Amino acid sequence: MKRVVVGMSGGVDSSVAAHLLVQQGYEVIGLFMKNWHDDSVVISRECPWLEDSNDALIVAQKLNIPFQTIDLSKEYKERIVDYMFHEYAQGRTPNPDILCNREIKFDIFLKTALKLGADYVATGHYCRKETSVDAHGNPLYHLLAGKDPNKDQSYFLCQLNQFQLSKALFPIGDMEKSTVRSVAREQDLVTADKKDSQGLCFVGKVRLPEFLQQKLQPKPGPIIEVPAHSPVYERSLMLAGDTHTDDPDLEQLTTAYSYNELAGKVVSQHNGAHYFTIGQRKGLHVGGTPKPLFVIATDTDKNIVYTGQGEDHPGLYRMGLFIRQAELHWIRKDLLLANGETARYQVRIRYRQPLEGATLFQRKDGMYIVFDRPQKSIAAGQFAAWYQGEELIGSGVIA
């Protein structure tokens, strides 16, 4: 009998995943990861991890499977939290959920499971895995989107490698969320109607700005509004027809706009440029403009937040992005591009964003991705992931 260790989070998805594995005849062990207990940065007096741990335990007892809790808070702080603070301090926007899967669930947690004699680890992610055989007769693992288009979570697993996928099971990947809840109710699981968590992957019921303010000190500075007709955008107009040529200007197409203090007028003050990210609307507290203001750039060195009016402001849009060579990751290494090669893929730059057609240009210094049409709010530090149909092929950190 194959042994599977299930990451039980105390939510309905991992609860049903565990139930399905029991049904399928696996020897199932439930493991809850305690990832955070630093109350100094948790403003709410609630204790989400304790509540979640209790729910996971109740489900495990209901399913009659062994259950234990492991404390990974030290590793979380070192690998996720410290990295997050460093990135935000540099004016970048990291994705803790992707890091959580790469560094914790499918690294430390996986190694823990293997020590327990597990053949696989399982999670409640809405994605699928398929296996084929390559030209040399070796198994090839494919990460596919979940069947529920509204819940597909393959993007969060875009940094997994072939070994991690070989050990992974995604029991609910073929199901829709409504079906998962129905199964939980049929089995009388305590998590059946529990709301999905909305907080950070490691903290729980805490809003990100509040969390950041615990470690990144407030630093007042100007909010500058840049007019839509600014000369800085003349570049994009000149390059508009360049995207479909055989030799586009990749650096110009993928470089973020550069602003200075003279780019516009000061309209208000902020409490720290490192608290803001590209495309952000809330938290600016600037009224009286015909259209709402959006963050179009931040300068953490000079502590300036640049904004523009309206969702159609040119500063919000770019034709492409760049990923440094060291930050490139291919799940399908057999499809890796050599220097000078190009390929067509569907790309997304954030969770649940519709896939967008793009051309990938591999060069010596890294990958240039040029979209078929301008993309909104491309933020350094986020992950771009490219797909072939339903399959996630590779990803990388936006420079």
Image: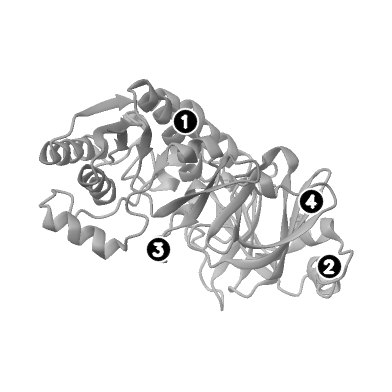
Give the amino acid at mark 1: Asp
| Rendered view: 330 above or below 194 | above
Left or right: where 211 falls relative to 224: left
* Tag 2 near tag 4, CB within 8 Å: no
- For label 2, count other residues whose C-alpha is less than 10 Å away and answer few (under 14), some (14-19) or many (20+): few
Distance from label 2 to label 4 (Cα)? 23 Å
Q: Element type at marker 1?
A: helix
Disc 2/disc 1 C-alpha distance (Å): 44 Å
Give the residue drawn at x 59%, y 74%: 310
Residue 306: percent from left, percent from top: 65, 58
Task: Say which of 17 and 34 sits in front.
Answer: 17
Which mark, by number, is residue 235? 2
| Colour pattern | one colour
- Residue on which disc 4 sits: 362
User: Dot 3, crowdedness within 10 Å: few (<14), some or many (≥20)?
Assistant: some
- Dot 4 lies on which element? strand
Quarter that holds the N terminus: top left
Is the residue 217 above or below the residue 342 in the image? above
Helix or strand or loop: what does disc 3 sit on?
loop
Q: CA distance from mark 1 to mark 4?
A: 29 Å
Q: Determine whether label 3 and label 1 are within 8 Å by CB.
A: no
Q: Which residue is mark 3?
A: 147
Q: For the point 35% across and 31% down, which residue is it?
A: 36
State the image coordinates of residue 326 (x, y, percent, origin top left).
Answer: 71, 37
Which mark, residue 107? 1
